[in-house]
Amino acid sequence: MNRIIKNLFLVIVIVIAAKFLLAVFAKDLPTVHAEKIVLADWTEQSIESLVKQAGLKDGSGAKIEFLSKSFLETPYALDTLGGKDTEKEKLTIDLSGVDCFTYIDYVESLRRSENFGEFKEKLAEIRYKGGKVLWKKRRHFFSDWVNGNDRNARDVTRQIGGNAAVTQTKELNRRADGSLWLPGLTVQKRDIIYIPSHKISTQILKNIKTGDYIGVYSDKDGLDVSHTGIAVRKDTGVYIRHASSIHKKVLDEELKAYMKNKPGLLVYRVN
């Protein structure tokens, strides 16, 4: 009887120890999640060649400009991620077409990568809070990029806009009638800083750098922005490089002209 008790005690100790070790080392185990990969005209090799060339560029802005340029003329595609809180989320890479959010996801993930495998890892970190590929962890709002412990960028809107910048408190995801834009996602109260379009001066444009990620402020309840893109400085001025639903492709448009009749501008910056 004593031997049985001792053996049972030993089994319990082993089980407890195993659970403890698993908890300690779980963070080092690879994350398993479903994937959907559509490379279209790209290959893993061409992507790796691209990030190697980008690595030779000096500074984040130059790398972002180089990488984003490779997507010019890529078709615009709506809802390539899909999904909802009741479905299993997939890490989606679909380069056959991009929308304004997936475009900046891919560019920033490529900037941080040295090979195709790392591109997938960085995409999970950019697109999802904590890198956990779950619909509820997805960064559904542009301002998710600059909030939380694992931010993708920093908000430089006030730094760029100075006294022209204003702050609007929003309840993200809650429509004016109280319903949710994204059922299953909680409402997040957040201060959104933006520069009203009519106050975008020559000096403010000078403060914007190539590689800045920019958003078009939305005056709708529950939304922070209606569109996103990348700032690119040229000899002829500052442009927004973006996936356009109007032109049905990725292209460059002069920023100030593009912002005419739009509520305002947000500017986020990496490094």
Image: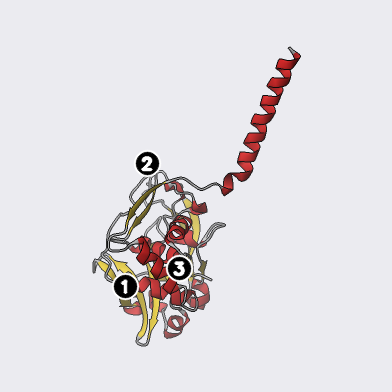
State the residue at coordinates (64%, 30%).
15
**Quadrant, the N terminus:** top right
For the residues labelled 1 and 2, say whether their Cβ atoms are less than 8 Å apart.
no
Q: Nearer the viewer, residue 149 or 10?
A: 10
For the residues labelled 3 and 1, say whether their Cβ atoms are less than 8 Å apart.
no
Q: Nearer the viewer, residue 247 or 73?
A: 73
Q: Position of residue 63 (x, y in %)?
A: 44, 74
Residue 87 - label: 2
SS class, disc 1: loop
Residue 261 - label: 1
3D distance between C-alphas at marks 3 and 1: 32 Å
Q: Is residue 227 above or below residue 84?
A: below
Tell whether 36 sits left or right of 271.
Answer: left
Q: Which residue is the site of mark 3?
A: 111
Q: Amino acid at mark 2?
A: Glu
SS class, disc 3: helix
Q: Residue furthest bottom?
A: 235
Q: Nearer the viewer, residue 145 or 203?
A: 145
Q: Amino acid at mark 1?
A: Asn
Specify the quadrant of the image occupied by residue 52: bottom left
3D distance between C-alphas at marks 2 and 3: 30 Å
In front: mark 3 or mark 1? 3
SS class, disc 2: loop
Q: Earlier in the sequence, mark 3 or mark 1?
A: 3
In front: mark 2 or mark 3? 3
Specify the quadrant of the image occupied by residue 48: bottom left
